[in-house]
Image: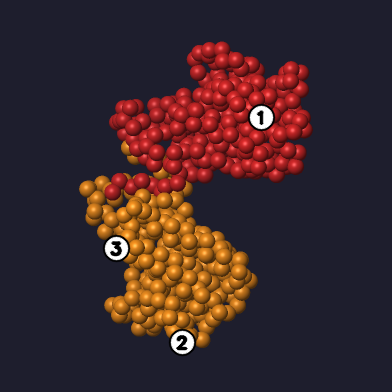
Chain colours: A red, B orange
Amino acid sequence: MMLEGKTALVTGGRGGIGRAIVARFLREGARVYAADLTPEGSLTVHNDDGSIFVKLDVTQEADAIAAMEQVGAEVGQLDILVNAAGIEIEKTIEQTTLEEWNLSFAVNVTGTFLTSKHALPLLRKGAASGASASIINFGSYDGFIADPGLAAYCATKGAVHALTRAMACDHGPEGIRVNAICPGYVDTPMLQSFFTGDGSGGGGKTIDQLQQAVRDVHPMRTYGTPDDIANLVNWLASDEARYASGQLWVLDGGLSAQVQQMKL
Amino acid sequence: MRLTGKRALVTGGRQGIGRGIVEAFCSEGATVTTCGRGARPDGLADDIIWYPLDVTDPDAVKALAATTNGTDILVNNAGVQVEKAVPDSSDADWDAVIGTNCRGVFNMCRAYIPRMDEGASIINIGSISGQFADPSMALYNASKAFVHGLTRSIAVDHGPKIRCNAICPGWIETGMLDAAFELANDPDAARRDAIARHATRRFGKPEDIASIAVWLASNEASFATGQLFTVDGGMTAASPLNPGLF
């Protein structure tokens, strides 16, 4: 077990990728707080998995403070923070309202800022206990290259990448490592919504045909699963990654290693 | 005219991107020498000097360099492409691609750097394929990554006297691109699909690459060195996965 004795908090912990991370952390022996808007998160049901639910709207500073007070009171320190809460608006900048733009930044960027800010005192205590503490942010391959019709999302993820490096510089000397995972296409409710939403561009294909076409564009001929993401999050959270900090970890089945796949 | 009084050498100036750079440099007032394997190409303006040169031959490169009394701009454009994955690539393929794209650039830089004056500019033609992989172009992709690494090394080792940058073209309308489309099952559909993947909704032209080469060669770029300048109509800014095109 790679995380025995560690305490972790995962925002978006009841969502698509968040649940897989929570489940993996639990299997690795960690005490896990799953922070989300509701116990079900972005899915419809939740079976008790042994994680401790914390109500957290990442856009609300009072929620972040309260969540960390709870962890502080119950454990006294935090070893791992995963900022997995995120939203995606499928629009160009012209279609995006100011409210949607602000919401995108509030959740994806301000949320990462607020949760990390108020977790730092507990993470310092985690680092002081010997091993390094680890913050894992959620960037995206969309922070490097653009998907059409995802302007605000792409911009927020670029911001998360820069924030990750800044946090790594500032808090590395305190024993706190900061990295970002940059997933490509991962099978989550967010991806399924992309398939059915405006982002797919129509084209007269069924969702099955669209999914297959997306798989075919990947060198690995599949898109990822939440477990694929949890595998790398688990490593970055563990002491095996004690020298890894300030980096953006792309996990996309090789999608962004290639240029456009022309139909020749 | 932005290159008046400058002496430029462009390798591989017979056709395509190299020819476009040669003509642009001429119209900006430079004295231009170009070279390639074989005889002087048809239609090359009389004031452009042509040398038959195989850049893979270090002795021939040294001999040509010995005849010059100084060069202000060196453009390493000569390159070859072999469309194969690793297991299919022969030793001859290795020699051809690495010989021209890597050793050729090295040969030229080694021979000309000592002959370049303060303020000189080396411009290497890299590729988007050196940053992201084109399928079944293994040696070509790797050779262009070499060019990118060498570009940074020369910039670091020979600044402030010499600047060195690379241009990374995307899909440029050349004979090479036409040949690729001819191989498609439906060349017209393939062309439409490829164009739709460019934010500019067109392929590049040799003059698109020549225009950034002129800027990099000019004194306007006197603070630009060690960098890769991608000119690809926005293609690599977009994800290779574009569901709108399925």
Query: Disc 3 on helix, strand or loop?
Result: helix
Q: Mark 2 touching mark 1, by CB under 8 A?
A: no
Which image quarter: residue A199?
top left
Q: Is residue A42 above or below residue B227?
A: above
Label annotation for residue B175: 3
Residues at marks 3 and 1, common chain? Answer: no
Q: Can you tell which of label 2 and label 1 is closer to the viewer? A: 1
Residue B13 lies, in percent from the top left, at 37, 73
Q: Give the left or right position of residue A66, taking residue A259 as reference.
A: right
Residue B240 lies, in percent from the top left, at 41, 43
Identify which residue is drawn at 43% across, 77% down. Answer: B58
Image mark count: 3
Which residue is denoted by mark 2 in the rendering? B67
- Kindly identify which chain the residue marked by label 2 belongs to: B
Q: Give the left or right position of residue A153, taking residue B37 as reference.
A: right
Identify which residue is drawn at 43% across, 42% down. Answer: A255
Per the model, the C-alpha gap separating discs 3 and 2 is 32 Å
- Kindly identify which chain the residue marked by label 3 belongs to: B
Residue B93 lies, in percent from the top left, at 34, 62
Label annotation for residue A80: 1
Q: Nearer the viewer, residue B52 or A65?
A: B52
- Kindly identify which chain the residue marked by label 1 belongs to: A
Identify which residue is drawn at 71% across, 34% down. Answer: A131
Label annotation for residue A58: none
Per the model, the C-alpha gap separating discs 2 and 1 is 66 Å
Per the model, the C-alpha gap separating discs 3 and 1 is 56 Å
Query: Disc 2 on helix, strand or loop?
Result: loop
Q: Can you tell which of label 3 and label 2 is closer to the viewer? A: 2
Q: Mark 3 touching mark 2, by CB under 8 A?
A: no
